[in-house]
Amino acid sequence: MSQRFVVPQFIEEENRIIGPVTVRQFIITMIVVVIEVIILGVAGLSAIFFITLLFFGVPGLVIAFVKVNGQPFHVFLLNIAQSIFTKPQLRVWNKDISAEELRLEINKNRLVQKSKPKIRIKKEKLTSSRLAELSLIVDTGGMYKGD
């Protein structure tokens, strides 16, 4: 007899802590708050506090709560970085190839294709009884072996 396992249904769903706030959002927000409280304790309500609030607080909250196309913002930033630093996907035609070289390449490809023998596999025609037998094998999970 085959074993049965419970398959998790919502593996893409993040765990929630308080209402709609996920664990990831909570941790990022707490890191930003701790950094700002430390800077507030060191510098007080000065220009340094407000500058760090602008450069750490706002981007931290954007990374925590903003979604782009249903994905978290940090995934969006990683996708941008990958598209910038990886090999471009745009292919450009090399115009330095002469028309004669192009004709030779095309003819070479045609000769290669003609020289390959075409192998045809004969398939048996499926009857309704054979289809019923195959569906029974699939439905029983392979327990029924067929004739």
Image: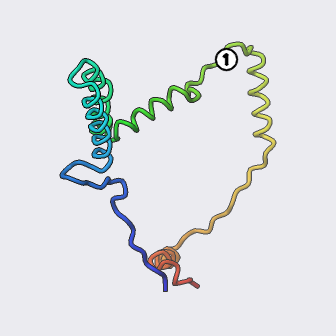
The image quadrant that residue 50 belongs to is: top left
Residue 62 in picture, x, y percent from top left? 29, 33
In the rendered structure, the answer to whether residue 63 lies left or right of residue 117 reads left
The residue sitting at 67% across, 63% down in the picture is 122
Whether residue 137 is visible: yes
The image quadrant that residue 101 belongs to is: top right
The residue sitting at 25% across, 54% down in the picture is 16
Kind of residue at badge 1: Asn
Q: How many marks?
A: 1
Q: Secondary structure at mark 1?
A: loop
Q: Is residue 6 above or below residue 85?
A: below
Whether residue 68 is visible: no
Colouring chosen for the image of the structure: rainbow
In the rendered structure, the answer to whether residue 77 lies left or right of residue 101 reads left
In the rendered structure, the answer to whether residue 7 lies left or right of residue 142 reads left
Residue 117 in picture, x, y percent from top left? 78, 49
Q: Is residue 34 above or below residue 84?
A: below
Residue 132 in picture, x, y percent from top left? 47, 77
In the rendered structure, the answer to whether residue 12 lies left or right of residue 125 reads left
- According to the picture, the residue beneath numbered tag 1 turns out to be 94
Question: For this rendering, which residue is in front, 1 or 66?
Answer: 66
Which residue in the rendered view is the most extreme toward the front?
Answer: 42
Q: Is residue 30 above or below residue 101?
A: below
The residue sitting at 67% across, 14% down in the picture is 95
Question: For this rendering, which residue is in front, 43 or 76?
Answer: 43
